[in-house]
Image: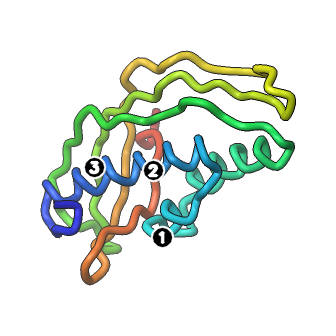
Amino acid sequence: MADENSPEGLEAFTAYWLELFSYGYETNDWAPFEAVTDPGCRTCENLKAEVQKHYESGGWIDGGGISLNSTNTEFVENTTGSINSFIDITQNEILYFDSSGIEVKGSKKTEPVLGVSIAYWEVDHWVMLDFGSPEGS
């Protein structure tokens, strides 16, 4: 369903995209995520850079899976042709370990958080353009 240009397809794509984001946290393999994410997504690049920096120092991350609880979209293209959605997400506990296996920091599971995703239908698939907090929050 994530390959449909419909509200249901956008919701399925958003859930899949968040799974790829979670996969990047745990593996530092960002290729699948980058394949469906616009390189101009600043939030994406900032979070990815933080994770990559930790892995480059020899550490690793456990957890951090992001779940999509719900979406809400009018499914109307904006002036650039993209579709905005309000998304309700939760992120699981994240544990950061250094190269010797010692936990160096962590964060608890988040309460549900309201965010915005902006995606674009490109011929036969969705591309995530941006992701983050609603403007003004």
The dot on residue 35 is 1
For residue 111, side relative to residue 85 (left or right): right
* Among the 4 quarters of the image, the one containing residue 60: top right
Q: Earlier in the sequence, mark 3 or mark 1?
A: 1
The dot on residue 85 is 3
Residue found at the far front of this picture: 100
The dot on residue 131 is 2
Q: Earlier in the sequence, mark 1 or mark 2?
A: 1
**Amino acid found under the numbered disc labelled 2:** Phe
**Amino acid found under the numbered disc labelled 1:** Ala
Q: Nearer the viewer, residue 116 or 21?
A: 21
Of helix, strand and loop, which one carries label 1? helix
- Give percent across and percent down for residue 77: 23, 67
Image quadrant where one finds the N terminus = bottom left
Q: Nearer the viewer, residue 66 or 133?
A: 66
**Amino acid found under the numbered disc labelled 3:** Ser
Kindly identify the residue that appears in the image at 15 percent across and 53 percent down: 74
Kindly identify the residue that appears in the image at 79 percent across and 37 percent down: 59
Of helix, strand and loop, which one carries label 3? strand
Q: Is residue 55 above or below residue 1?
A: above
Q: Earlier in the sequence, mark 2 or mark 3?
A: 3
